[in-house]
Image (cartoon, helix red, strand yellow):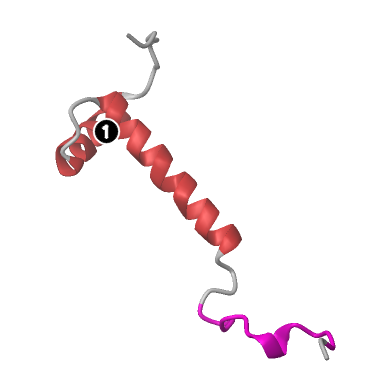
């Protein structure tokens, strides 16, 4: 079993987390927070590595830039 700890949040934040928990159909607040962290991480990665998505075509032999004759 994972070790646990207490995290102090305002009542308003706890209520918002409970609403998110219901919307996301997660079993616990821990799972809700983990899901939010994972989504945020995914967005950061897509932002960093997807800057040219849709702007750059597929690589082909003409792009190689070297004389292979």
Between 55 and 68, which is closer to the camera in this rendering? Answer: 68
Relative image position of residue 57 (x, y in whole percent): 57, 84
Q: Assess whether residue 57 is covered by the magenta stretch.
A: yes
Instruction: Report the quarter where the C terminus lies.
Output: bottom right
**Residue at the location (19% across, 34% down)?**
26
Q: Quadrant of residue 20?
A: top left
Relative image position of residue 51 (x, y in whole percent): 59, 69
**Residue at the location (40% across, 10% down)?**
5
Between 68 and 65, which is closer to the camera in this rendering? Answer: 68
| Identity of the residue furthest to the front in this view | 69
Instruction: Report the quarter where the N terminus lies.
Output: top left
Q: Quadrant of residue 58?
A: bottom right
Tell whether 45 sits left or right of 59: left
Which residue was labeled with disc 1? 17
Helix or strand or loop: what does disc 1 sit on? helix
Relative image position of residue 68 (x, y in whole percent): 81, 86
Q: Quadrant of residue 2?
A: top left
Tell whether 19 sits left or right of 5: left
Between 17 and 65, which is closer to the camera in this rendering? Answer: 65
Q: Assess whether residue 8 is covered by the magenta stretch.
A: no
- Range covered by the magenta-colored residues: 54-67
- Secondary structure, magenta segment, majority class: loop
């Amino acid at each position: 079993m994972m070790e646990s700890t207490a995290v102090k949040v305002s009542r308003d934040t706890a209520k918002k987390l409970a609403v998110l928990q219901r919307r996301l159909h997660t079993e616990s607040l821990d799972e809700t927070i983990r899901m939010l962290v994972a989504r945020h991480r995914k967005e950061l990665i897509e932002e960093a590595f997807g800057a040219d998505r849709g702007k750059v075509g597929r690589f082909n032999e003409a792009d190689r830039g070297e004389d292979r004759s």
